[in-house]
Image (cartoon, rainbow, N blue to C red):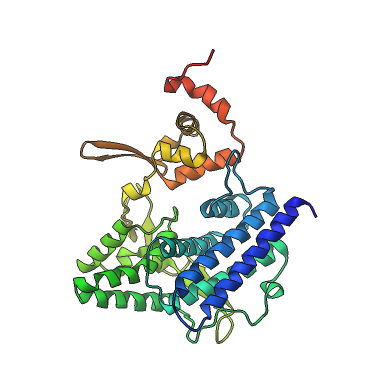
Amino acid sequence: MPRAKRDVAELKKRAVNSLVLGIELFNRPHDKGRSESVLILLHHSFEMLLKAIIKDETGTVHAKGEKYTYGFDKCLEIAQNEIKVISADERATLSILDAHRDIAIHYYQEVSEDLLYLQAQAAVTLFDDLLQLVFAERLADCIPKRVLPVSTRPPKDLKILIDSELSQVDELLHAGSRKGIQAAARLRPILALATATRESAERVTESELRKAISRRRQGDDWSVILPEVAQLKLDTQGGGIPIFLRIKKDADIAFRIAKDNERVVGTLIKQEINIWDKYNLGRDDIAKKLGISGPKTSALILELSIQSDPECFKILRRKSTTFKGYSKKALEKLQSAIVAGVDIEAVWKKHRDRFGAKKRK
C-alpha cells in the first residue's frame, strides 16, 4: 500500500478510536472529568477524520514550508471551501464543538447533560455522514452497533433547551454576586453556540462573557444579546432516542444579524463585537503563523490587498496607542494563498522597495 494511503487509513483509524472513546466516556457511570473528556475526544476524532479526508483528496495536510500539519480551523476552511465535503451548517456544528473543546482545555464551563448529549449525538451523526460521503463506509461497519451516546431525555427542540439553560443562568444572576462565577460557567457553553456560528467562528472571550452578563443585568433580552442562537434548530430522525441529529442554521427567526458596515433597518439588529477581539493579530503574529519573515508577510499583505478589506484589517486606537489589527479572516486568506502556491520570493522581489529593503550584492 502506498504511504499516502497508509497515512489516510491510520488517520481514519485514530479518528474512529477517539470517537469510540468519547462515546464510552459519555456513557460512563460517574461524572468526574466526563464532559471535558468527551468534548476533547470528539474534537480529536474530527481533526483526524478531516485530515484523513484532506490527505485523501489533496495528498497533503501541510502548508507549503510549514513544519506542522493543518490546525482545526484550516481543516474546516479546506473541507468547506476547497474540497467541499462539508456544508456551512456542518462547519458551524464543528465550530461549536471546537469552541466547547477550547473552553474545556483552557478554562472551565458548566455543560448541562442535555447540551453534552446534543454535542455527542450531533458528532456521531456528522461523523457517519462524512465517512459515508468520502469513504463509502458506515460508522456501524467500524464499531459495534450498540455504541451510541445514550440519554434518557434527548432534546428535540433546541429553543426549549436553550431557554431552559438561560433561565438557570438568570436564577444564578438574581442570586447576587456570590453566584456570578457559577452563572458565567453556565453561560460559557451557550455563548459558544453563538460565537462559533458567526462567519468568523470566534472563540468565547472573557470580555464578551462579561458584556453579555452586564447587558442581561441591565434588562436586555437574551434574544438580543445572543441573536445567533435563535437561528439554530435541530433536525432529528428516528423515534425514541434520535439516531440522527443535526444542528442547522435555518430556524424561523424574526430578525437577522447585520454585517459590519451594513445599515441597520427593519428586522436587522446590529451585532456588537469587540473590535479588539476581532482584529487581534499584529503583522508579526501573522508572520509567525505563516512561518515567513515579517517584511515578506507585509509584502504578501500588500500583494493581496488585505488592508483594503474591512473584514480583514482595521486601524485601532486607544488613547495614544495605535494598532494595525488583522482578523482571523485575513490570516485565512494569506494561508490559502500560500497553500495555492503563491511565490513568496517573487512577491517580495516585487514589493521589497516599499519596505526599505535593498538588493544584496
Hey, which quadrant is residue 109 in on the image?
bottom left
169 in relation to 72, above or below: below
Q: Quadrant of the N terminus?
A: bottom right
Q: Position of residue 210 (x, y in %)?
A: 27, 61
Instruction: Report if residue 125 is visible in the image.
Output: no
Residue with the most extreme right position = 1
Q: Could you say which quadrant of the image residue 174 lies in?
A: bottom left
Residue found at x 69% / y 48%: 59
Residue 289 percent coordinates (x, y): 48, 42
Of the 4 image quadrants, the one containing the C terminus is top right
How far across and how far down the image is residue 58, in percent? Answer: 68, 48
Please state if 128 lies on the left or on the right of 310 as rendered.
right
Decide which of 356, 257 is in the foreground and name it. Answer: 356
Whether residue 211 is situated above or below residue 17 in the rendered picture = above
Residue 49 position within the rendered picture, expressed as x and y whole percent measured from the top left: 62, 61
Q: Residue at x 59, y 34 (%)?
A: 342
From this viewpoint, is residue 360 visible? yes
